[in-house]
Image (cartoon, rainbow, N blue to C red):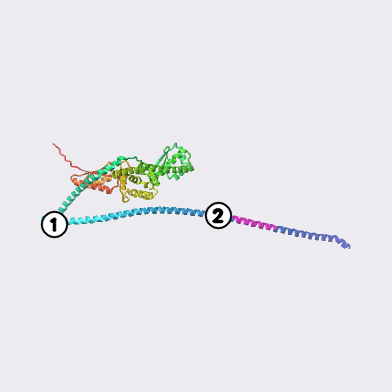
Amino acid sequence: MLILAQASPIILIVVACAGGLLFGAAMVFFIGLAQGKTGARRARELVAEAASEAERIKKEAGIAAKEEALQRREKLEKESNDQRAELRELERRLSKREDNLDRKVDVLNKKEHYIETLERNLALKRKEISAEEAELERLMEQEKIQLHKISSLSRDDAERLLLQRLESELERECAELIRKRVSEAKENAERQARKILGIAIQRYAADHCTESVVTSVELPGDEMKGRIIGREGRNIRAFEKETGMDVVVDDTPGVVVISGFDGVRREMARRAMEKLVRDGRIHPARIEEVISQTRKEMEQIIMDTGKEAAFDVGIHNLHPREIECLGRLKYRTSYGQNQLQHSTEVAHLAGTMASELGLDIQLAKRCGLLHDIGKSVDQEIEGAHPEIGADIARKCEESPEVINAVAGHHEDVEAASIYTVLVAAADAISAARPGARRETLEKYVKRLQRLEEIAGAFTGVESAYAIQAGREVRVIVNSDRIDDKVAAKTCRDIAKEIEAEMTYPGDVKVTLIRENRFVEVAH
């Protein structure tokens, strides 16, 4: 008992320790169990958050992919539209070239038909000449036989004598016939032609301006040049891009130069530059605005100019397209001759000649006024200006006489009416009269030299001089080698040679002088 009593505290202590251990183990167990539940819940929360983040990232990736796909689609559609626009522009150009080729083929077919007609006529003439030559040879052979019978000359001597006599007689007969026919033609035709042309020229005259490709614009001061150029040249580049003209800013004080071959664009650029200088506000946006306004003003000015020209000539009911072409001719020159003034002059000349011949004056004036409308757009459309003008007149539903006059005033097509001939004559008069057109000094000197060379190459010519600005050639021949009858034939041959070898405006008069001088000295 004592031992038990003594061991009780120890047992209690042991039991207490064991209980404490058990309690601690239980607490550890329960604490571990509680922590395990919390970790699982935390893990589930992390998994849920990860799944939510993954879903968000997935949605964002889907949206970004859709946006990228949309951008690529828009880019592809833009590229496709650009390619379609390029293809349409290419188709338009090909169609225009095809139309031009069709017109050229038509002209070539007409020329081919005309050449075939000439070849047929030439073949018939060759046959006639061959028949005449055969008849001439037969007659010469008969005469040789007769001469051989009645003369003691040998066959060769008789043949040579006969040929010399026939050649001399034939040359004199030809010269006499030429002089006779020329005199008759001059008596009947030259009088009326001189009268008609003299009256036409006397009734109408106009001033002409020289051809120019530059226009000067005055500035209030040299500091304005810097404003026109702009920072790093942006103003002048914007101006040149909008107008299509070159702006030259040099050391010339108070002046800038606008250069370009298109007269309408050059005039529009001049007006726009003057507006900008007056306004003082010069920057790309203002330049674009002013040029847009000026372009509209130029369109109205062109229409007003065309209407004024038609009113001055007395022609009404013109198509708006024709009026526009006439207005554009004011800014078009050819060899220094203003084309609008030239067209009105041709209209007046053609009307005057038509009145003298008893024809329709209004129709003649209409043909003359519209004959050069193709020059207003010949820088934009391929082809010669008669073809372009005839196409415009055809689209404007002009009469066949007007269309033929426009297409044939340079003999590109065959004249189908008398009005085409009148317009061609009036066009030659307007272009060929002294002072109407300029000619470079080099071409002028070469033309004079060529005239003298052609005249000096004929037999018996001692000297030749080109006078009257190349409109007359004075030829002096040797009177011992050429008589009066042969001189007439030589003069005509020189004129024909000049017609065949040279191109010139108007006419060239050939004056041949044959003179005999006898000198004696009295002692």
Residue at the image point whose x is 77% and y is 60% from the top = 26
Q: Is residue 439 left or right of residue 157?
A: right
The spot of residue 179 in percent (x, y) is 21, 46
Q: Is residue 273 left or right of residue 132?
A: right
**CA–CA distance between discs 2 and 1?**
111 Å
The spot of residue 24 in percent (x, y) is 78, 59
Of the image marks 2 and 1, the number of the one nearer the N terminus: 2
Please state, as top left, top right, bottom left or bottom right, where the C terminus lies in the image: top left
Q: Is residue 15 visible?
A: yes
The part of the chain drawn in magenta is: 41-60
Q: Amino acid at mark 1?
A: Ile
The residue lying furthest to the right in this view is 1
Q: Is residue 261 left or right of residue 415?
A: right
Give whichever of 324, 295 is nearer the camera.
Answer: 324
Q: Amino acid at mark 2?
A: Glu
Report if residue 43 lies within the magenta region: yes
Categorize mark 2 by other alpha carbons within 10 Å: few (<14), some (14-19), many (20+): few
Determine which residue is flagged by label 2.
68
Q: Is residue 336 visible?
A: no
Give whichever of 232, 181 is nearer the camera.
Answer: 181
* SS state under label 2: helix
Determine which residue is flagged by label 1.
145
Give whichever of 225, 163 is nearer the camera.
Answer: 163
